[in-house]
Amino acid sequence: MTVTILPVQTQSQRREFVRVARRINADKPLWVPNLESESLKEITPAKNPFYEHATAQLFLASHNGQAVGRIAAIENPRHNEHWKDRVGFFGHYECIDDLEVSQALYSTAEQWLRERNLTSMRGPTNPAMNTSAGFLSGGFEYTPTIPMPYTPAYYLHQAEAYGLRPAMELLVYGFKFEEHSQAEKDNTWERVQRMSNFVQKRANVRVRTVQMDAISEELEHVRSICNISLKDNWGYIPMTPAELEAARDELQGIVDPALFLFAEIDGQPEAVFIACPDYNELLKKMDGRLFPTGWWTYLRQRRHIKKHVIYVYAATPKAYAVGAGAVLYENFFGECLRRGIAHLETGYILDSNTKMRNSIEKFGAEIWKRYQLFEKDFKV
């Protein structure tokens, strides 16, 4: 197969970059298309605050004039400043089931990164770890939740065939309330309440919901908690003020204030839980399109989504020390049960984050999905 790799330079090429994902994944029943406008915004530097401190080059692979794959090569100086390394990244990877095409894409991304004196290539990050990352490696029977990808198993083989090696596994936990008997729910709820009561006897822990009329200040609390609690997590990069502002604009449209909770110790926010409806339920029905009828599906069904996603769960060392998470869990799970939420799914949790994993597993959550990040060291 004759493969041509072209750098994306125009808006029409960006649209082709977005649309090739649909052509490659159209035959996969569990794949969910994103809104084209959102995908374009994500890869347009002027519209994504990530690119205030990072640079990327998008590439399209074509055969006989038909796009057959894509990749982004990404340089993230803030990552390298934080971790004191010279790692480059790849992301937004899509490819037909053809090793020649995949090898050409990876080789082109590697060359771009090498030209910037970066020493390895890690990914996929789309474009960063805190948004969407990894190739699906377990849980292919589940529909993905926003913003996680659904990628075919052959992507794993393509990565390894190029010389990329597993670097870190990301886990996604799930809990199906509807599959538990009332007795099981009562037992879990009693356990949560017992732990919460024990904590509240030892420490001045109070849980409150977000104040949406002061969302900027509230998100500053989120940023502070995350930057303290996650700073040593593999691959984490502290949020910038611009990224915080973008998060504010996004959350105001989708967040349920009753599921945006802080745990305060002596009046100071030390832990946070943010859960939102999984809008992939609707995007699947809308086929990723607002028009001609997608907008009506969204307006009619958005309040009836039964699966929710925990976008953020973070706790400072002080919160862990007193067990504030138990009080947060009591309030959070209580609200889920009151609302009749059927499924609950976490965001990414590092396989190596045993503290977080143990905390979640205590309440009956199970691993539903696994995502694999790969890396290739250029020095080897």
Image (cartoon, rainbow, N blue to C red):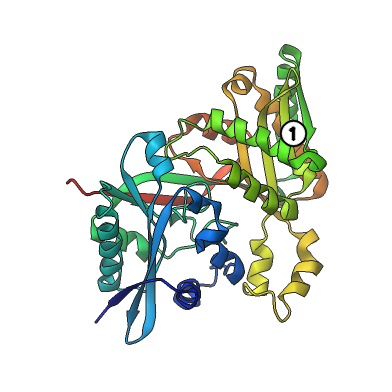
**Residue 128 location in percent, x, y?**
47, 50
| Residue 103 versus residue 221 in the image, above or below | below
Along the horizontal axis of the image, is 206 left or right of 14? right
Q: What residue does disc 1 label? A: 189
Q: Residue at x 72, y 17 (%)?
A: 198
Residue 95 can be seen, yes or no: no
**Residue 6 location in percent, x, y?**
33, 74
**Residue 310 location in percent, x, y?**
64, 45
Q: Residue at x 47, y 73 (%)?
A: 25
> Which image quadrant: the N terminus?
bottom left
Along the viewing direction, whichever of 154 and 294 lies nearer the viewer: 294
**Residue 285 location in percent, x, y?**
67, 72
Q: Residue at x 60, y 69 (%)?
A: 37
Residue 262 can be seen, yes or no: yes
Q: Indicate the secondary structure of the residue bearing disc 1.
A: helix
Amino acid at dot 1: Trp
